[in-house]
Image (cartoon, rainbow, N blue to C red):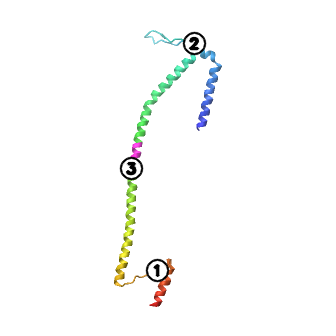
């Protein structure tokens, strides 16, 4: 896209240069502008080449356009600052919620660890009383080695 706009501008400037080059007599003739408001005396500019008068009007148009767009640029800058502040606030809220979520996830992991510790504690209590644990059938299906050990222990008893 940048190359296309560059090519378009080169073509436009080429046509302007061609127009000026082919009409040098017109652009180099000196002319004087006059301004008469009726209230004050008539004002005449010194004689200047028409090319200089074109450049004066061109740059004055640029200055006027700059000043007219100045207020909208200030408004846009203010809007950008407000939006950046809102983004920062929302990012802070997101970080806070992520840390809260991590904290909640962190609470689940210790709860699982405490359940494993509780199971180990109950195993020791069961061993002290002499009761035997009943084998879980789901565990037997998953681990065939314990099945063969359980069968051999049943045959012995």
Compute the Cα span from label 2 to label 1. Answer: 109 Å
In percent of width and height, residue 59 lies at: 51, 23
Give the quadrant of residue 27: top right
Marks 3/2 in contact by CB < 8 Å: the verdict is no
> Who's the residue at 38% across and 61% down the image?
104
The numbered mark at residue 30 is 2
The crowding category of the residue bearing disc 1, from other C-alpha atoms within 10 Å (few below 14, some 14 to 19, many at least 20), is few
The crowding category of the residue bearing disc 3, from other C-alpha atoms within 10 Å (few below 14, some 14 to 19, many at least 20), is few
In which quadrant will I find the N terminus? top right
In percent of width and height, residue 38 lies at: 45, 11
Compute the Cα span from label 1 to label 3. Answer: 50 Å
Residue ID for mark 1: 137
In which quadrant will I find the C terminus? bottom left
Q: In this view, does 104 lie to the left or right of 42?
A: left
Q: How many labels does the image show?
A: 3
> Who's the residue at 45% across and 28% down the image?
68
Q: Is residue 58 magenta?
A: no
Q: Looking at the image, is mark 3 or mark 2 earlier in the sequence?
A: 2
- From which residue to which does the magenta span run? 84-90
Up the image or down, 8 lies above or below 32; here it is below
Give the quadrant of residue 106: bottom left
Compute the Cα span from label 3 to label 2. Answer: 66 Å
Give the quadrant of residue 111: bottom left
The one nearer the camera, 126 or 49, is: 126
Up the image or down, 132 lies above or below 43; here it is below
The one nearer the camera, 141 or 116, is: 116
**Element type at marker 1?**
helix
Residue ID for mark 3: 92
The crowding category of the residue bearing disc 2, from other C-alpha atoms within 10 Å (few below 14, some 14 to 19, many at least 20), is some
Marks 1/3 in contact by CB < 8 Å: the verdict is no
> Who's the residue at 43% across and 36% down the image?
77
């Amino acid at each position: 896209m940048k190359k296309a706009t560059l090519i378009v501008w080169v073509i436009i400037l080429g046509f302007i240069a061609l127009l000026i080059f082919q009409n040098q007599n017109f652009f180099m003739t000196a002319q004087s502008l006059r301004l008469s408001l009726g209230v004050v005396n008539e004002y005449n500019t010194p004689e200047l080449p028409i090319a200089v008068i074109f450049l004066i009007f061109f740059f004055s148009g640029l200055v006027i356009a700059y000043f007219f767009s100045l207020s909208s640029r200030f408004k846009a800058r203010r809007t950008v600052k407000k939006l950046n502040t809102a983004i920062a606030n929302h990012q802070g809220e997101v970080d806070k919620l992520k840390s809260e979520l991590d904290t909640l996830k962190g609470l689940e992991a210790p709860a699982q660890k405490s359940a494993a510790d509780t199971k180990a504690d109950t195993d020791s209590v069961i061993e002290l009383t002499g009761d035997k644990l009943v084998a879980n059938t789901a565990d037997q299906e998953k681990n065939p080695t314990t099945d063969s050990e359980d069968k051999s222990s049943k045959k012995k008893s």
